[in-house]
């Protein structure tokens, strides 16, 4: 993986001829490259729009749909174009899209408003994705820096633990943790998580992906610690903590930034897979995965139950994936971190 | 060579041991609450729970609990208390469907991945390459269960081209077996085709600028021969390594989602149904044996590669 040093070189090379190129910081150069990548920006904007929509879920539920994500309307009727219709017909067939305030995208078999659940579910999926990514990045960065900096015994222990998580297939580990924690919940020190808490899937996904980020970071720290500026800091009297924090960490920032969007995409996909299986977000909480799981049995008669959350999921993941690819190309033109290598585990 | 094999086997055994400990911890120790109650399932009588606590030894010291659990798993004594079925018997019964899915899909994704990768590299920057790049991105961003659902809707329900899920044993009717498996094979392959074609494309482009390729061209060898004998041959090594790992992962439970969407009645679907009922014993056994399969298959792969390529056994310590 390229250090900041080589990013500058690569950037300067690519921008040769542009007279303002000299003296710009690597991030400026990266930002400039990103701005030229219209496809990445468009897909990033798509993801941004989805995020904003999902954050507005309570507003929509309150002001437009006048319901809540888990409210049942099985026995009620709704007026569409002057005709009164059952929300769920006596044969159990839920209403399709009405294209008006109430039941904009139809109802599910429990008479719940799909559009409201879609937004709340998206909020849950995105929250799980964001929290899991945060957990992965923080723990993986700490583990990677500590292992790479101290080497020896510490590295040996950390590397074995990471290898173990790595050897455990991602989906299987997620399923194992998801099933057992959904039943019992977990206590980490003073923190008690109930089995149906949203934090449980976030915690699981966050743990599962740590080695995929920690390993490359460790490799980079191993190279960084041999560089002159680290020696200079040590000669200047800096202790290990200070060197790790203010000499090594800043040099890892581009790697960390490159990983974040890819990890968010993978976390959302894994959340969907676990929720689909019943080992992720627990009912009645909506998430895109649980909505697909609920709808899939009714595909022949009510395919919108599956296709609507499915489309949102694919658009969100595609958006952040393409944007992440663009960020990587911009910050780290010669990087070996490839989307393909990391995405593969998440969605079998 | 013998030393490499022995070292690799020792590390495999250590990893297997560690995985068994981790599985035990995840299911019996880490979650809050009574393990016997979890094991018994949602609809259980106090008598069942008490019996489970006795037979699984949940009052014993923890190392003895571990030994009891492992003994039960490997001697095939684990019973699903929700369904009153022996878990290992059920797994044996479901294994043919899982193997059929994995082997067929593995062949398809390897052939198509190589084909698309080569096409993409030969037409780098042209329309075919760009179209394949976009297709690969969409493929990587679509969960397989959604893809399966969409495929079933259009090709089994709207146009009745394929059966609506289900599995027919090969020994019973080979044609029907094939007919039922085509959609699941294709859906499971899409993601891998996307990944493999991208990886092979960049490998090919890297290899094409190697000196020995220029030398081969300079000797006057035909372009086709250069491509097949010099470029592709070397670029395929990492792809084959990737394939064997992914194939192991699919056999070891990676096809859970595909199986349950297409109702294939395989080991994965058994696990999926057990998860939905939060039936712990089958999930525990399937997860652990799946992880074991992945570790053992990847050790075998490493040994085979070391036999084929001396560089690996010299540097791969």
Image (cartoon, coloured by chain):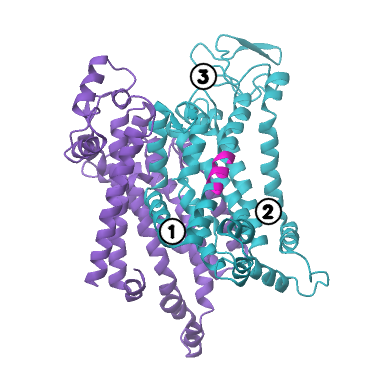
> What residue would you read off at disc 3?
A109
Mark with earlier residue (3, 1): 3
Q: Is residue B163 visible?
A: no
> What residue would you read off at disc 1?
A155
Q: Residue furthest left?
A: B75
At which x and y percent is residue A194?
47, 26
To which quarter of the image does residue A129 belong? top right
Q: Residue at x 68, y 32 (%)?
A: A55
At which x and y percent is residue A318?
60, 47
Q: CA distance from mark 2 to mark 1?
A: 37 Å
Subunit bearing disc 1: A
Q: Residue furthest right?
A: A19
The answer to whether dots 2 and 1 both sit on one chain is yes
Task: Give, as a single range, the part of the protein colored magenta.
Answer: A130-138
Horizontal side of B81 relative to A171 (left or right) equals left
User: Is A203 above or below relative to A144?
Assistant: above
């Amino acid at each position: 993986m390229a250090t900041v040093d080589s990013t500058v070189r690569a950037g300067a090379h690519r921008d040769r001829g542009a007279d303002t190129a000299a003296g710009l910081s690597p991030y400026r150069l990266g930002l400039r490259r990103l701005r030229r990548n219209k496809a990445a920006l468009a897909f990033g904007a798509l993801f941004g729009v989805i995020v904003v929509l999902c954050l507005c879920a309570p507003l929509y539920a309150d002001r437009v749909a006048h319901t809540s994500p888990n409210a049942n309307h099985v026995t009620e009727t709704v007026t569409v174009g002057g005709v009164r219709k059952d929300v769920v017909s006596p044969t159990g067939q839920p209403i399709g899209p009405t294209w008006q305030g109430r039941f904009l995208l139809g109802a599910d078999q429990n008479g719940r408003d799909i559009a409201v659940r879609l937004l709340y579910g998206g909020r849950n999926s995105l929250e799980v994705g964001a929290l899991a990514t945060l957990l992965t990045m923080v723990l993986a960065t700490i583990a990677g820096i500590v292992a790479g900096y101290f080497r020896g015994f510490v590295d040996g222990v950390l590397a074995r633990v990471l290898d173990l998580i790595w050897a455990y297939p991602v989906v299987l580990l997620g399923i194992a943790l998801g099933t057992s924690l959904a039943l019992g919940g977990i206590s980490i020190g003073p923190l008690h998580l109930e089995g149906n808490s949203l934090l449980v899937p976030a915690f699981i996904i966050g743990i599962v992906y740590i080695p995929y980020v920690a390993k490359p970071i460790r490799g980079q720290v191993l190279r960084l610690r041999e560089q002159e500026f680290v020696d200079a800091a040590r000669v200047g009297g800096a202790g290990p903590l200070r060197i790790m924090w203010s000499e090594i960490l800043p040099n890892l920032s581009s790697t960390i930034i490159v990983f974040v969007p890819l990890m968010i995409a993978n976390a959302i996909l894994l959340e969907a897979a676990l929720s689909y299986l019943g080992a992720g977000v627990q009912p009645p909480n909506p998430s895109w995965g649980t909505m697909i799981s609920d709808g899939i049995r009714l595909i022949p008669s009510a395919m919108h139950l599956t296709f609507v959350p499915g489309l949102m999921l694919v658009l969100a993941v595609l958006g952040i994936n393409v944007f992440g690819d663009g960020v990587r190309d911009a910050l780290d033109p010669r990087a070996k971190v490839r989307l393909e290598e990391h995405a593969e585990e998440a969605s079998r | 060579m013998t030393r490499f094999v022995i070292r690799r086997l020792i590390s495999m055994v250590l990893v297997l041991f560690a995985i068994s400990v981790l599985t035990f911890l995840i299911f019996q120790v880490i979650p809050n609450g009574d393990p016997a109650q979890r094991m018994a399932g949602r609809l259980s009588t106090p008598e069942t729970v008490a019996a489970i606590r006795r037979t699984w030894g949940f009052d014993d010291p923890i190392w003895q609990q571990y030994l009891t659990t492992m003994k039960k798993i490997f001697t095939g004594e684990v019973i699903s208390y929700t369904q009153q079925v022996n878990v290992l018997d059920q797994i044996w019964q479901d294994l043919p469907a899982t193997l059929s899915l994995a082997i067929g899909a593995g062949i398809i994704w390897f052939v198509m991945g190589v084909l698309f990768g080569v096409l993409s590299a030969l037409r780098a920057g042209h329309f075919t390459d760009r179209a394949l790049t976009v297709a690969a991105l969409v493929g990587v961003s679509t969960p397989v269960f959604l893809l399966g659902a969409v495929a079933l809707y259009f090709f089994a329900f709207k146009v009745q081209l394929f059966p609506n899920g289900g599995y027919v044993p090969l020994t019973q009717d080979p044609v029907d077996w094939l007919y039922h498996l085509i959609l699941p094979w294709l859906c499971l392959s899409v993601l891998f085709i996307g990944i493999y074609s991208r990886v092979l494309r960049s490998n090919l482009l890297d290899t094409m600028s190697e000196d020995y390729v220029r030398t081969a061209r300079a000797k006057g060898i035909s372009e086709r021969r250069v491509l097949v004998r010099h470029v592709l041959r070397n670029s395929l090594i990492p792809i084959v390594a990737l394939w064997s790992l992914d194939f192991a992962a699919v056999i070891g439970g990676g096809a859970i989602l595909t199986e349950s969407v297409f109702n294939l009645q395989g080991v994965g679907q058994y696990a999926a149904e057990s998860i939905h009922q939060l039936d712990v014993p089958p999930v525990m056994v399937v997860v652990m044996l799946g992880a074991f399969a992945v570790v053992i298959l990847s050790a075998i792969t490493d040994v085979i590669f070391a036999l084929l390529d001396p560089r690996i056994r010299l540097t791969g310590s």
